Amino acid sequence: MKFSPRKVRLKDEREVLLRHVAVSDAPRIIEFVQGFVYEEEFVPLSEGEFNPSIDEEEHILSNYIERSNSLFLVAEYEGKLVANINVDGNQRKILRHTAVFGMGMHKDWQGCGLGTAILQAAIDWGRANPELELLFLQVYAENLAGLTLYRKMGFAEHGRIPGFFKQNGRYHDEISMHLRLK
Ligand SMILES: CC(C)(COP(=O)(O)OP(=O)(O)OC[C@H]1O[C@@H](n2cnc3c(N)ncnc32)[C@H](O)[C@@H]1OP(=O)(O)O)[C@@H](O)C(=O)NCCC(=O)NCCS
Protein backbone atom coordinates (compact mmCIF):
# COMPACT_ATOMS: atom_id res chain seq x y z
CA MET A 1 0.00 0.00 0.00
CA LYS A 2 1.30 3.45 -0.91
CA PHE A 3 0.19 5.13 2.33
CA SER A 4 -1.40 3.49 5.36
CA PRO A 5 -4.56 5.43 6.30
CA ARG A 6 -4.44 7.02 9.73
CA LYS A 7 -6.62 9.13 12.00
CA VAL A 8 -5.31 12.39 13.42
CA ARG A 9 -6.80 14.55 16.17
CA LEU A 10 -6.78 18.31 15.51
CA LYS A 11 -6.39 21.20 17.96
CA ASP A 12 -10.20 21.49 18.19
CA GLU A 13 -10.52 17.74 18.99
CA ARG A 14 -12.04 16.88 15.61
CA GLU A 15 -10.63 13.64 14.25
CA VAL A 16 -9.90 13.37 10.53
CA LEU A 17 -8.85 10.44 8.40
CA LEU A 18 -5.72 10.86 6.24
CA ARG A 19 -5.62 8.50 3.28
CA HIS A 20 -4.28 8.22 -0.25
CA VAL A 21 -6.60 9.32 -3.01
CA ALA A 22 -8.27 6.69 -5.22
CA VAL A 23 -9.21 7.03 -8.90
CA SER A 24 -12.87 6.76 -7.87
CA ASP A 25 -12.44 10.01 -5.85
CA ALA A 26 -12.23 12.04 -9.08
CA PRO A 27 -15.73 13.64 -8.92
CA ARG A 28 -15.31 14.40 -5.21
CA ILE A 29 -11.87 15.96 -5.77
CA ILE A 30 -13.26 18.24 -8.47
CA GLU A 31 -16.12 19.31 -6.19
CA PHE A 32 -13.81 19.76 -3.20
CA VAL A 33 -11.24 21.88 -5.08
CA GLN A 34 -13.91 23.99 -6.78
CA GLY A 35 -15.46 24.49 -3.34
CA PHE A 36 -12.53 26.41 -1.91
CA VAL A 37 -9.93 27.56 -4.46
CA TYR A 38 -11.74 30.52 -5.97
CA GLU A 39 -12.28 32.10 -2.54
CA GLU A 40 -8.58 31.82 -1.70
CA GLU A 41 -6.49 34.92 -2.29
CA PHE A 42 -3.27 32.87 -2.19
CA VAL A 43 -4.13 30.22 -4.77
CA PRO A 44 -3.20 31.31 -8.31
CA LEU A 45 -6.40 30.13 -9.99
CA SER A 46 -9.11 32.36 -11.41
CA GLU A 47 -12.82 31.55 -11.44
CA GLY A 48 -13.53 28.63 -13.79
CA GLU A 49 -9.89 27.66 -14.40
CA PHE A 50 -10.07 24.37 -12.52
CA ASN A 51 -12.56 22.52 -14.64
CA PRO A 52 -11.31 19.05 -15.58
CA SER A 53 -13.68 16.39 -16.88
CA ILE A 54 -14.05 13.31 -14.68
CA ASP A 55 -11.94 11.33 -17.19
CA GLU A 56 -9.17 13.93 -17.07
CA GLU A 57 -9.20 14.00 -13.26
CA GLU A 58 -9.14 10.19 -13.13
CA HIS A 59 -6.06 10.26 -15.37
CA ILE A 60 -4.34 12.82 -13.12
CA LEU A 61 -5.13 10.81 -9.97
CA SER A 62 -3.97 7.53 -11.52
CA ASN A 63 -0.60 9.18 -12.24
CA TYR A 64 -0.23 10.05 -8.55
CA ILE A 65 -1.08 6.44 -7.69
CA GLU A 66 1.26 4.84 -10.23
CA ARG A 67 4.28 7.14 -9.94
CA SER A 68 6.56 5.84 -7.21
CA ASN A 69 7.86 9.32 -6.29
CA SER A 70 4.42 10.99 -6.11
CA LEU A 71 1.69 11.16 -3.49
CA PHE A 72 -1.81 12.60 -3.21
CA LEU A 73 -3.28 12.59 0.28
CA VAL A 74 -6.75 13.68 1.29
CA ALA A 75 -8.20 14.38 4.71
CA GLU A 76 -11.77 13.21 5.31
CA TYR A 77 -14.19 14.21 8.01
CA GLU A 78 -17.51 12.41 8.34
CA GLY A 79 -17.06 11.08 4.80
CA LYS A 80 -16.40 14.53 3.31
CA LEU A 81 -13.09 15.66 1.76
CA VAL A 82 -11.72 18.59 3.75
CA ALA A 83 -8.04 18.98 2.72
CA ASN A 84 -5.48 17.68 0.27
CA ILE A 85 -1.77 17.64 -0.46
CA ASN A 86 -0.34 16.61 -3.81
CA VAL A 87 3.35 15.77 -4.04
CA ASP A 88 4.29 15.79 -7.69
CA GLY A 89 7.50 13.80 -8.20
CA ASN A 90 9.50 14.84 -11.24
CA GLN A 91 9.55 12.14 -13.97
CA ARG A 92 12.89 13.12 -15.56
CA LYS A 93 15.81 10.89 -14.58
CA ILE A 94 18.00 13.79 -13.44
CA LEU A 95 15.19 15.23 -11.31
CA ARG A 96 13.43 12.10 -10.02
CA HIS A 97 14.70 12.80 -6.49
CA THR A 98 12.70 16.06 -6.38
CA ALA A 99 9.01 16.83 -5.97
CA VAL A 100 6.98 20.01 -5.89
CA PHE A 101 3.85 20.06 -3.78
CA GLY A 102 0.65 22.01 -3.29
CA MET A 103 -1.90 21.81 -0.53
CA GLY A 104 -5.14 23.40 0.54
CA MET A 105 -8.34 23.30 2.49
CA HIS A 106 -11.55 25.26 2.94
CA LYS A 107 -11.40 28.33 5.21
CA ASP A 108 -13.55 26.52 7.81
CA TRP A 109 -10.70 24.09 8.40
CA GLN A 110 -7.76 26.49 8.48
CA GLY A 111 -5.79 27.19 11.62
CA CYS A 112 -6.67 24.02 13.54
CA GLY A 113 -3.56 21.99 12.78
CA LEU A 114 -4.79 20.15 9.69
CA GLY A 115 -2.09 21.66 7.45
CA THR A 116 0.57 20.57 9.94
CA ALA A 117 -0.86 17.04 10.11
CA ILE A 118 -1.19 16.44 6.38
CA LEU A 119 2.17 18.04 5.52
CA GLN A 120 3.90 16.03 8.28
CA ALA A 121 2.38 12.84 6.84
CA ALA A 122 3.70 13.75 3.37
CA ILE A 123 7.19 14.59 4.72
CA ASP A 124 7.34 11.30 6.66
CA TRP A 125 6.30 9.46 3.50
CA GLY A 126 8.95 11.33 1.49
CA ARG A 127 11.67 10.48 4.02
CA ALA A 128 10.77 6.79 3.76
CA ASN A 129 10.59 6.91 -0.05
CA PRO A 130 13.78 5.47 -1.58
CA GLU A 131 13.84 7.97 -4.47
CA LEU A 132 12.84 11.32 -3.00
CA GLU A 133 15.44 13.64 -1.48
CA LEU A 134 14.06 17.16 -1.96
CA LEU A 135 10.65 18.79 -1.60
CA PHE A 136 10.03 22.32 -2.82
CA LEU A 137 7.18 24.78 -3.25
CA GLN A 138 6.16 28.27 -4.28
CA VAL A 139 4.10 30.48 -2.01
CA TYR A 140 2.71 34.03 -2.06
CA ALA A 141 4.96 36.25 0.08
CA GLU A 142 1.82 37.50 1.92
CA ASN A 143 0.61 33.98 2.79
CA LEU A 144 1.46 34.16 6.47
CA ALA A 145 -0.28 30.90 7.38
CA GLY A 146 1.57 29.06 4.62
CA LEU A 147 4.96 30.60 5.42
CA THR A 148 4.53 29.91 9.15
CA LEU A 149 3.61 26.29 8.42
CA TYR A 150 6.50 25.68 6.01
CA ARG A 151 9.11 27.34 8.27
CA LYS A 152 7.82 25.35 11.23
CA MET A 153 8.26 22.12 9.25
CA GLY A 154 11.88 23.01 8.44
CA PHE A 155 11.56 24.46 4.93
CA ALA A 156 14.20 27.04 4.00
CA GLU A 157 13.70 29.98 1.66
CA HIS A 158 15.94 30.02 -1.42
CA GLY A 159 14.44 32.71 -3.57
CA ARG A 160 11.96 35.47 -4.15
CA ILE A 161 10.53 36.69 -7.46
CA PRO A 162 9.07 40.19 -7.15
CA GLY A 163 5.73 40.61 -8.89
CA PHE A 164 5.44 36.94 -9.87
CA PHE A 165 1.66 36.80 -9.36
CA LYS A 166 -0.53 39.37 -11.13
CA GLN A 167 -4.04 39.35 -9.79
CA ASN A 168 -6.74 41.87 -10.52
CA GLY A 169 -4.11 44.42 -11.54
CA ARG A 170 -2.01 43.91 -8.38
CA TYR A 171 1.39 42.26 -8.21
CA HIS A 172 2.44 39.85 -5.46
CA ASP A 173 5.90 38.46 -4.71
CA GLU A 174 6.60 34.72 -4.77
CA ILE A 175 8.79 32.93 -2.25
CA SER A 176 10.45 29.60 -3.15
CA MET A 177 11.23 27.14 -0.34
CA HIS A 178 12.74 23.68 -0.07
CA LEU A 179 13.25 20.89 2.43
CA ARG A 180 16.00 18.25 2.25
CA LEU A 181 14.47 14.90 3.15
CA LYS A 182 17.76 13.05 3.59
C1 LIG B 1 -1.74 27.49 4.26
C2 LIG B 1 -2.47 26.32 4.89
C3 LIG B 1 -2.09 25.04 4.13
C4 LIG B 1 -1.98 26.16 6.35
O1 LIG B 1 -2.65 25.08 6.96
P1 LIG B 1 -3.44 25.27 8.34
O2 LIG B 1 -4.09 23.98 8.68
O3 LIG B 1 -4.28 26.47 8.26
O4 LIG B 1 -2.20 25.52 9.32
P2 LIG B 1 -2.02 24.96 10.82
O5 LIG B 1 -3.28 25.15 11.58
O6 LIG B 1 -1.44 23.60 10.78
O7 LIG B 1 -0.96 26.00 11.35
C5 LIG B 1 0.43 25.92 11.04
C6 LIG B 1 1.18 26.97 11.84
O8 LIG B 1 0.89 28.25 11.24
C7 LIG B 1 0.29 29.10 12.20
N1 LIG B 1 -0.79 29.81 11.54
C8 LIG B 1 -1.95 29.29 11.08
N2 LIG B 1 -2.68 30.24 10.50
C9 LIG B 1 -1.97 31.38 10.60
C10 LIG B 1 -2.19 32.72 10.16
N3 LIG B 1 -3.32 33.06 9.53
N4 LIG B 1 -1.23 33.63 10.42
C11 LIG B 1 -0.09 33.29 11.05
N5 LIG B 1 0.19 32.03 11.47
C12 LIG B 1 -0.75 31.10 11.24
C13 LIG B 1 -0.24 28.22 13.29
O9 LIG B 1 -0.26 28.88 14.53
C14 LIG B 1 0.70 27.04 13.27
O10 LIG B 1 1.83 27.24 14.08
P3 LIG B 1 1.86 26.58 15.59
O11 LIG B 1 1.64 25.11 15.40
O12 LIG B 1 3.23 26.94 16.04
O13 LIG B 1 0.76 27.22 16.34
C15 LIG B 1 -4.00 26.49 4.90
O14 LIG B 1 -4.33 27.62 5.66
C16 LIG B 1 -4.62 26.63 3.50
O15 LIG B 1 -4.94 25.62 2.88
N6 LIG B 1 -4.79 27.86 3.04
C17 LIG B 1 -5.43 28.11 1.73
C18 LIG B 1 -4.66 27.55 0.55
C19 LIG B 1 -3.20 27.86 0.63
O16 LIG B 1 -2.77 28.95 0.97
N7 LIG B 1 -2.40 26.84 0.30
C20 LIG B 1 -0.95 26.94 0.30
C21 LIG B 1 -0.47 27.42 -0.99
S1 LIG B 1 1.33 27.46 -1.03
Image (cartoon, grey):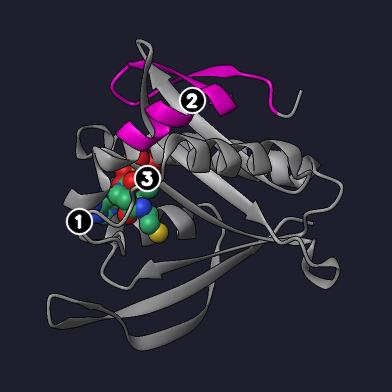
Disc on res. 39: none
Q: Check residue 60 for magenta coloring.
A: no
- Range of the magenta residues? 3-31
Q: Nearer the viewer, mark 2 or mark 3?
A: 2
Q: Earlier in the sequence, mark 2 or mark 3?
A: 2
Number of callouts: 3
Badge 2 vs badge 3, beta-carbon distance below 8 Å: no
Percent x, y of residue 136: 59, 64
Residue at the (33%, 26%) spot, across then down: 11
Residue at the (45%, 38%) spot, across then down: 84
Q: Is residue 119 above or below residue 78?
A: below
How crowded pointer 1 is (Cα within 10 Å; few <14, some 14-19, many 20+) is rated as: few
Disc 3 CB within 8 Å of nearest ligand 1 atom: yes
Q: Earlier in the sequence, mark 2 or mark 1?
A: 2
Disc 2 CB within 8 Å of nearest ligand 1 atom: no
Q: Is residue 142 left or right of residue 138?
A: left
Q: Check disc 1 and report its element: helix, strand or loop.
A: loop
Percent x, y of residue 34: 27, 41
Q: Check residue 6 for magenta coloring.
A: yes
Which image quarter holds the N terminus?
Answer: top right
Percent x, y of residue 85: 50, 43
Disc on res. 25: 2
Q: Is residue 137 left or right of residue 108?
A: right
Percent x, y of residue 46: 23, 61
Which kind of residue does numbered mark 1 sit on?
Glu
Please give the residue where the numbered disc 1 appears in the rendered image.
47
Q: Check disc 2 and report its element: helix, strand or loop.
A: helix
Which kind of residue does numbered mark 2 sit on?
Asp
Marks 2 and 1, how far apart at CA: 22 Å
Q: Is residue 111 above or below residue 180?
A: above
Please give the residue where the numbered disc 3 appears in the rendered image.
104
